[in-house]
Image (cartoon, grey):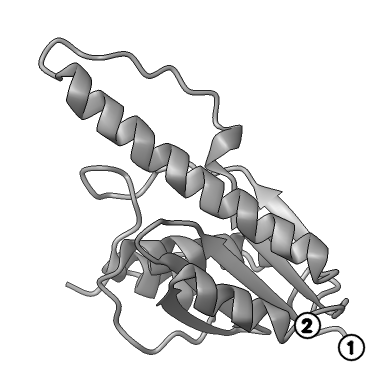
Amino acid sequence: MMIPNLKTKYRAIIAIDPDVDGSGFAILNGRVLHTRRMMMPELIEFLRGYRKREDVVVVVEAGWLNPSNQHIKGTEKARYASKIGEKIGRCHEIGRQILEFCKFYDLPHVEKFPLKKIWNTRDGKISHKELMALCAGSRVEYGFETKDQEQRDAALLAIDHSGIPMIMAPIKQ
Protein backbone atom coordinates (compact mmCIF):
# COMPACT_ATOMS: atom_id res chain seq x y z
CA MET A 1 0.00 0.00 0.00
CA MET A 2 1.41 3.38 -1.02
CA ILE A 3 1.21 6.23 1.46
CA PRO A 4 0.08 9.54 -0.09
CA ASN A 5 2.62 12.36 -0.39
CA LEU A 6 5.63 10.05 -0.33
CA LYS A 7 7.75 9.50 -3.39
CA THR A 8 8.69 6.01 -2.28
CA LYS A 9 7.19 2.54 -2.47
CA TYR A 10 7.71 1.96 1.25
CA ARG A 11 5.06 2.25 3.95
CA ALA A 12 7.69 3.27 6.49
CA ILE A 13 11.23 4.57 6.49
CA ILE A 14 13.53 3.65 9.36
CA ALA A 15 16.54 5.97 9.48
CA ILE A 16 19.57 5.35 11.67
CA ASP A 17 22.48 7.61 12.58
CA PRO A 18 24.97 5.05 13.95
CA ASP A 19 26.79 5.89 17.16
CA VAL A 20 28.69 3.88 19.74
CA ASP A 21 26.92 5.62 22.64
CA GLY A 22 23.45 4.92 21.20
CA SER A 23 22.33 5.33 17.63
CA GLY A 24 19.83 7.95 16.57
CA PHE A 25 16.70 6.22 15.31
CA ALA A 26 13.74 7.66 13.42
CA ILE A 27 10.73 6.02 11.85
CA LEU A 28 8.59 7.91 9.37
CA ASN A 29 5.13 6.44 8.69
CA GLY A 30 3.52 8.59 6.04
CA ARG A 31 4.00 12.03 7.57
CA VAL A 32 4.25 10.95 11.21
CA LEU A 33 7.78 10.92 12.61
CA HIS A 34 9.02 9.29 15.81
CA THR A 35 12.58 9.35 17.10
CA ARG A 36 14.57 7.85 19.93
CA ARG A 37 18.05 6.71 20.80
CA MET A 38 18.82 3.00 20.85
CA MET A 39 21.77 0.90 21.88
CA MET A 40 22.84 -1.80 19.41
CA PRO A 41 21.03 -4.80 21.04
CA GLU A 42 17.73 -2.88 21.26
CA LEU A 43 18.08 -1.67 17.68
CA ILE A 44 18.77 -5.17 16.35
CA GLU A 45 15.80 -6.55 18.30
CA PHE A 46 13.61 -3.82 16.78
CA LEU A 47 14.82 -4.59 13.25
CA ARG A 48 14.16 -8.29 13.78
CA GLY A 49 10.47 -7.44 14.16
CA TYR A 50 10.51 -6.17 10.56
CA ARG A 51 12.32 -9.14 9.02
CA LYS A 52 11.38 -10.01 5.46
CA ARG A 53 9.14 -6.93 5.20
CA GLU A 54 9.25 -5.37 1.76
CA ASP A 55 7.17 -2.31 2.65
CA VAL A 56 9.82 -0.90 5.04
CA VAL A 57 13.27 0.43 4.15
CA VAL A 58 16.17 1.01 6.54
CA VAL A 59 18.36 4.03 5.73
CA VAL A 60 21.74 4.07 7.48
CA GLU A 61 23.99 7.12 7.43
CA ALA A 62 27.21 5.79 5.92
CA GLY A 63 29.92 8.15 7.10
CA TRP A 64 32.55 5.82 5.67
CA LEU A 65 31.46 6.97 2.19
CA ASN A 66 32.78 10.46 2.99
CA PRO A 67 36.15 11.08 1.41
CA SER A 68 38.10 12.27 4.42
CA ASN A 69 41.28 14.19 4.70
CA GLN A 70 42.09 14.23 8.37
CA HIS A 71 45.37 15.82 9.21
CA ILE A 72 46.51 16.97 12.62
CA LYS A 73 46.20 20.73 12.89
CA GLY A 74 48.90 22.71 14.63
CA THR A 75 47.07 22.98 17.94
CA GLU A 76 45.86 19.37 18.07
CA LYS A 77 47.89 16.64 19.65
CA ALA A 78 48.41 13.26 17.99
CA ARG A 79 46.72 11.49 20.91
CA TYR A 80 43.60 13.67 20.56
CA ALA A 81 43.43 13.02 16.81
CA SER A 82 43.90 9.31 17.44
CA LYS A 83 40.97 9.25 19.90
CA ILE A 84 38.72 11.03 17.38
CA GLY A 85 39.75 8.57 14.67
CA GLU A 86 39.02 5.64 16.99
CA LYS A 87 35.53 6.93 17.84
CA ILE A 88 34.71 7.62 14.18
CA GLY A 89 35.93 4.16 13.22
CA ARG A 90 33.78 2.55 15.91
CA CYS A 91 30.70 4.49 14.74
CA HIS A 92 31.35 3.39 11.16
CA GLU A 93 31.59 -0.22 12.31
CA ILE A 94 28.23 0.10 14.13
CA GLY A 95 26.70 1.31 10.85
CA ARG A 96 28.21 -1.58 8.90
CA GLN A 97 26.92 -4.08 11.47
CA ILE A 98 23.41 -2.61 11.22
CA LEU A 99 23.55 -3.11 7.44
CA GLU A 100 24.69 -6.71 7.94
CA PHE A 101 21.68 -7.36 10.17
CA CYS A 102 19.42 -5.81 7.52
CA LYS A 103 20.84 -8.24 4.96
CA PHE A 104 20.40 -11.14 7.39
CA TYR A 105 16.79 -10.13 8.10
CA ASP A 106 16.03 -9.58 4.38
CA LEU A 107 15.15 -5.95 5.03
CA PRO A 108 15.47 -3.46 2.17
CA HIS A 109 18.28 -1.07 3.13
CA VAL A 110 20.23 1.90 1.83
CA GLU A 111 23.68 3.26 2.69
CA LYS A 112 23.05 7.01 2.72
CA PHE A 113 25.86 9.45 2.10
CA PRO A 114 25.92 11.91 5.04
CA LEU A 115 23.83 14.99 4.38
CA LYS A 116 25.56 18.35 4.06
CA LYS A 117 25.83 20.37 7.24
CA ILE A 118 24.01 23.49 6.08
CA TRP A 119 22.11 24.48 9.21
CA ASN A 120 22.55 27.66 11.27
CA THR A 121 24.46 26.14 14.17
CA ARG A 122 28.18 26.54 14.77
CA ASP A 123 28.93 23.02 13.48
CA GLY A 124 26.29 23.12 10.73
CA LYS A 125 24.14 20.38 12.29
CA ILE A 126 20.39 20.80 12.54
CA SER A 127 19.08 22.35 15.76
CA HIS A 128 15.84 21.41 17.48
CA LYS A 129 14.20 24.69 16.37
CA GLU A 130 15.28 24.12 12.77
CA LEU A 131 13.94 20.56 12.80
CA MET A 132 10.61 21.80 14.18
CA ALA A 133 10.46 24.47 11.44
CA LEU A 134 11.32 21.89 8.78
CA CYS A 135 8.62 19.51 10.05
CA ALA A 136 6.04 22.31 10.19
CA GLY A 137 6.87 23.55 6.70
CA SER A 138 6.95 20.03 5.26
CA ARG A 139 3.76 19.02 7.10
CA VAL A 140 5.47 16.25 9.05
CA GLU A 141 3.98 15.53 12.47
CA TYR A 142 6.76 15.54 15.08
CA GLY A 143 5.44 16.84 18.34
CA PHE A 144 8.07 16.22 20.98
CA GLU A 145 11.35 17.84 21.91
CA THR A 146 14.71 16.18 21.74
CA LYS A 147 18.06 17.63 22.66
CA ASP A 148 19.71 14.57 21.11
CA GLN A 149 21.67 15.33 17.93
CA GLU A 150 21.69 11.71 16.74
CA GLN A 151 17.88 11.62 16.84
CA ARG A 152 17.62 14.88 14.91
CA ASP A 153 20.12 13.58 12.33
CA ALA A 154 18.11 10.36 11.94
CA ALA A 155 14.89 12.39 11.56
CA LEU A 156 16.53 14.47 8.83
CA LEU A 157 17.69 11.30 7.03
CA ALA A 158 14.15 9.88 7.09
CA ILE A 159 12.55 13.06 5.74
CA ASP A 160 15.24 13.42 3.07
CA HIS A 161 14.83 9.82 1.91
CA SER A 162 11.02 10.06 1.84
CA GLY A 163 10.91 12.55 -0.99
CA ILE A 164 8.73 14.89 1.05
CA PRO A 165 9.63 18.42 -0.09
CA MET A 166 11.79 20.05 2.56
CA ILE A 167 10.16 23.39 3.26
CA MET A 168 11.10 25.56 6.22
CA ALA A 169 8.39 27.32 8.17
CA PRO A 170 9.42 30.53 9.96
CA ILE A 171 11.49 29.64 13.03
CA LYS A 172 9.78 30.55 16.29
CA GLN A 173 12.12 32.39 18.62
Q: Amino acid at mark 2?
A: Arg
- Where does the image place residue 48, in percent across and percent down from the top left? 71, 80
- Where does the image place residue 152, in percent across and percent down from the top left? 40, 66
Vertical comparison of 31 with 70: above or below: below
List the residue tagged with mark 1.
1
Question: What label sits on residue 11 in the rendered view?
Answer: 2
Name the residue nearer the viewer: 75 or 147.
Answer: 75
Q: Are marks 2 and 1 in contact (CB under 8 Å)?
A: yes
Name the quadrant of the N terminus.
Answer: bottom right
Name the quadrant of the C terminus.
Answer: bottom left
- Residue depicted at x 68% and y 67%: 162
Vertical comparison of 15 with 43: above or below: above
- Residue depicted at x 84% and y 79%: 55
Residue 163 in view here? no
| Crowding near the residue tagged with mark 2, few <14, some 14–19, many ≥20 C-alpha atoms within 10 Å | some
- Residue depicted at x 19% and y 28%: 80
Residue 46 lies in what quarter of the image?
bottom right
Disc 2 to disc 1, how far (Cα)?
Answer: 7 Å
Q: In screen coordinates, is 4 left or right of 28?
A: right
